Amino acid sequence: APPPPRAVVSADDPNYRAPSVNAESFDESSCGETTFIAETKLPTESGYYRLRGYRHSVDGAEPTEPVAIVFGDIEGRADVPVRVHDACFTSEVLGSLKCDCKQQLQLAMEYIQENDGMVIYLQQEGRGIGLANKIAAYALQDTKGLDTVDANRALGLPDDVREYTAVANILDDLDVRSIRLMTNNPRKVATLEKLGVHIKGRIPCIVKPNLFNQGYLEAKEGRMKHFLDGSWCHWNHDGGTVDEFDAKETDSEEEISADATMDDEGRGGW
C-alpha cells in the first residue's frame, strides 16, 4: 500500500521549509568543451562494457574527466536509454547508506545491459559542491539535524550546481538522436532539454529506502521536486521497517529485476 499523503504545510507554519530555489534551474551561460580521448572494452563482474574517456572544461576552467559507459551499438540510434550519473565517493566506494546513488548506478548498469544504452558518469560530487564540502554538509546533518538542502545553505553553498554541457557533447559525439532519460530529477530533465538534448521519455530510477537515507529521499521529493511517489517511506504499515519486512520475503520476491524496477510503462511518464 502507498504511504499516507503528507499534510500540506503553509508558508506561515513554523515547520515550513522552502523548496530548493534552483531545483528546476539550469545554467544558460556555461560553455563546455568536451574532447574524446579513447575507448576500451572493460570486463566487469556483470559483463563487458565499452568505456569511453573524455576531457571536459567549462568556461576555460580546470578540466574534469567524464566517462561514457556503453553497452551495445548505440551510435546513430534514437530513444537510447541514458543515465546521467554524478560521482558519489561515499556510497560507490565506501558503501554509505545515507543516499541512493550507488543503487541507482547499479540499476542503470543492469538496465543498459538488457536494453543497449549508456551511463554518462560525471565528476560532480555532492550535487557539484565537491567531496570536502559534502562531508561538511553531512556533519551539519549529523549535529544540527539539517536536511540536505539546509545543510548546503548553512555552509553558504547552493542547492545544486551541477552542469551538463558534457552530456550534450557526448551525445553529439556518438550521434545519439534522442534518449530515454533514467532519472527522477526534474532539474536534470529541464537542463538537458535547454541544452538541446531530445528526451523522448523518462525511466524512473527508484530504489528501496533504508533507515539512514529516508530523510534524504524525503528532502529530494519534497524540496527538490524529484519524482519519488513517496517511495522514501522506510516504515511499512505493519509497524516494522522496510528492512525487517524484506527479511521475510522469499528469494523469488527479493529478486526484482532492474527492468521491472525501472519500467517506464504505466508510471505516468514525465
Image (cartoon, grey):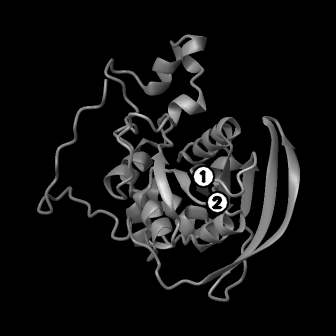
Residue 175 located left or right of residue 183:
right
Amino acid type of the residue tagged 1 in the rendering: Val
Q: Name which residue lies at 17% across and 44% down.
A: 7
Q: Is residue 266 visible?
A: yes
Residue underneath mark 1:
82
Q: Is residue 122 above or below residue 261?
A: below
Q: Which quarter of the rendering shows the N terminus?
A: top left
Q: Residue 19, percent across and down? A: 30, 62
Q: Which residue lies most toward the bottom here?
A: 60
Asked whether disc 2 touches disc 1, contact meaning CB atoms under 8 Å apart, the reply is yes
- Total number of numbered discs in the rendering: 2
Q: Nearer the viewer, residue 119 or 252?
A: 119
Q: Residue 116, percent across and down? A: 68, 43
Q: Residue 265, percent across and down? A: 43, 35
Q: Nearer the viewer, residue 121 or 78?
A: 78
Q: Residue 65, percent across and down? A: 75, 69
Disc on res. 198: none
Amino acid type of the residue tagged 2 in the rendering: Val
Q: Nearer the viewer, residue 191 or 100?
A: 191
In terms of secondary structure, where does tag 2 sit? loop
In terms of secondary structure, where does tag 1 sit? strand
Residue 90 located left or right of residue 24:
right
Q: Is residue 136 visible?
A: no
Q: Nearer the viewer, mark 2 or mark 1?
A: 2
Q: Name which residue lies at 68% across and 58% down.
A: 76
Residue 225 located left or right of residue 41:
left
Q: Are there few (<14), some (14-19), or many (20+) residues within 10 Å of tag 2?
A: some
Disc on res. 176: 2
